[in-house]
Amino acid sequence: MTHKTSNAVDPFAHLHDENYDAPYVHPRCKARDMVTMAGRQTVSLNGDWRFTLDLFDEGLRQKWFAQPPMPVNQWRVPRDYDESDAQTLSVPSVWSLAKPEWTYFEGGGWYSRSIHHEEHDQRVFLRIGAANYEARIFLNGHFLASHQGGSTPFFVELTPHLQAGDNRLQINVDNRRRPERVPMHHFDWFNDGGIYRDIELVLLPRTFIKDFSLSLVPDGTLSTLHCTVTLSDHDNGTAVLVIPELSLTQDITIAGGQGKVEFSVPLRLWSPEDPHLYECRISFGSDTVTDRIGFREIRREGTTLLLNGKPLYLRGVCVHEDDVRLGKVSTIEDVTRRYQDAKRLGCNALRLAHYPHHEHAAKLADEMGLMLWEEVPVYWAIQFDNEATYQDAHNQLEEMMTRDRNRASVIIWGVGNENADTDARYSFMRRLADHAKSFDPTRLVGAACLINREQFRIEDRLADHLDIIGLNEYFGWYEEGFEGLRQLLANSKPDRPVLISEVGADALAGHHGPDSELFTEERQAWVFENQIEAIRNIDWICGFFPWLLYDFRSPRRQTSIQNGINRKGLIAEDKRTQKLAFEVIAGFYRQIGNEA
Ligand code: GCB
């Protein structure tokens, strides 16, 4: 079919353009565009936005953003998008839970609202806490930038594009699962869509402190502090670090926008028993950032983990960012409940699976004295031979590390989970692990590693690039009995600490029966009893992370017992109903707590 028109613009051209999204990729927001949020002045854009689902990407194809909003009675040609009668969706939220018919929607969504701007001389940045998976920002009809990665924050400067008065801000979010993404299209949790963390404007002076780090150098002295400062511009001058409780005022020479300093000072160290935080302030010119920071040293010596020089056993539990009512939205109340339940279990550590959680997870862990393993979703069969996939994973890792680099609670950066052993995987993950280590020498780098299933031993080329070896093992559940586990433990001679990074079994809360019957609470408890028996006296195992605290939504789980839920929680998805296994773990943690 051909369409003839006398207009200069062919209204049908987009029907034949399969390269329609190419103009909306670059610039792409990256870790290097991030701005420290420590004590920043912000204007929240949370609340109601106009929202339209877009399964076929018509918004990009037809350039909905370029169509000035106007009532239908003024249109000269028909349109497929009318902002004024769009639905309302609250941000943060996931569209998957907004309406039953949207539950499994995977495609595009358009958010739109107006922002009012009055002339002032501050710089204005848009910050989005997370949007799953790809986002594209449009202001006043112009594309500004895109971002990839569903769990990390990104920043776009609006200053040059804002006009006095009302401005039209549109955000296109795409949650399609794709083989080249991180995670790829196959994973064991729910693929929520939308802007599900806070969205805000950040107001900053012309030259501002873009990033800083302040941490204890892991040199064994427990008193050397290292501070770095990066400015938004290549200015020279002096930044000043003040820690009132230490009566400390320290100059930092800034040359070409960068500065660093190292000095020694007696410290009250951060630990789970005493999660002490210092009020810290850094100023340069008219800008000041403030944060509450703890100082601790985490390192390994042979197969031992040391926190502040003392041997450490991680009494852990894994947790997803999931809620049957809110999806991936994590409120402070929800994170607080997670941590209270973990503490009731006797934990001193959590593995935040399998992607970066909300930033208040680490802030709260700092305050409450819990240690964290944070990770990026390099999960299962990522396209390890795809350089673009590597760059995406690398950027997500760097965004996570940049965001949480001043959180004492975070002791491990995780670079992957259960990835099959190929040369491409080895080179991909080695790059990530080496990068994490050079970016941040104050933390441990880990991954859930591989087992040789013929010889029953831990065997993974990646281990040489890690500080800790994570071991996901499901003996007693996916693998029958515990003989394989006993052999594995007897045959393995790791030269560095091993954490059982996942272990568990499904149980439907309230479903009882003999421990030989799958999905009963008794079976789950029996699996943990046997697991604990097998691993408890192995001296190179430095931590235990049951999979996991709460049951969570996973559309892969389709039996009537599962009903779309992975039931390996120690607590059901209502986050209240405790299963028998909870007490088994709590008993183990009480014992090792007493032995310590
Ligand atoms: C695993 C994965 C985790 C799954 C879990 C399971 O090994 O790392 O994401 O949810 O097993 O329940 O099968």
Image (cartoon, helix red, strand yellow):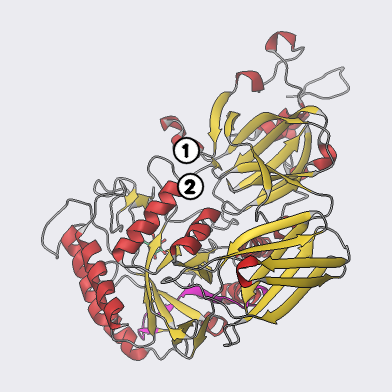
- Residue situated furthest left in the rendering: 514
Which residue is at a point 14% across and 65% down the rendered structure image?
516
Foreground residue, 8 or 590? 590
The reply to whether the magenta stretch includes residue 416 is no
What's the mark number on residue 96? 1
Q: Is residue 481 above or below residue 154?
A: below
In primary-sequence order, the first of circles 1 and 2 is 1
The reply to whether the magenta stretch includes residue 449 is yes
Taking the image as drawn, is residue 548 in sight? no
Label 1: element kind: helix
Q: Is residue 365 above or below residue 466?
A: above
What's the mark number on residue 191? 2
The image shows residue 482 at horizontal and vertical percentages of: 24, 77
Q: Can you tell which quarter of the image residue 262 is in?
A: bottom right
Which residue is at a point 54% across and 39% down the rendered structure image?
92
Q: Can you tell which quarter of the image residue 503 is in?
A: bottom left
Residue 180 as seen in the image, left or right of residue 319: right
Residue 339 as seen in the image, left or right of residue 532: right
Taking the image as drawn, is residue 153 in sight? yes
The image shows residue 337 at horizontal and vertical percentages of: 37, 52
Q: Are marks 1 and 2 in contact (CB under 8 Å)?
A: yes
The image shows residue 232 at horizontal and vertical percentages of: 81, 58
How many C-alpha atoms fall within 10 Å of the one at disc 1: few (<14), some, or many (≥20)?
many
Q: Quadrant of the C terminus?
A: bottom left
Magenta range is: 437-457
Q: CA distance from mark 1 to mark 2?
A: 8 Å
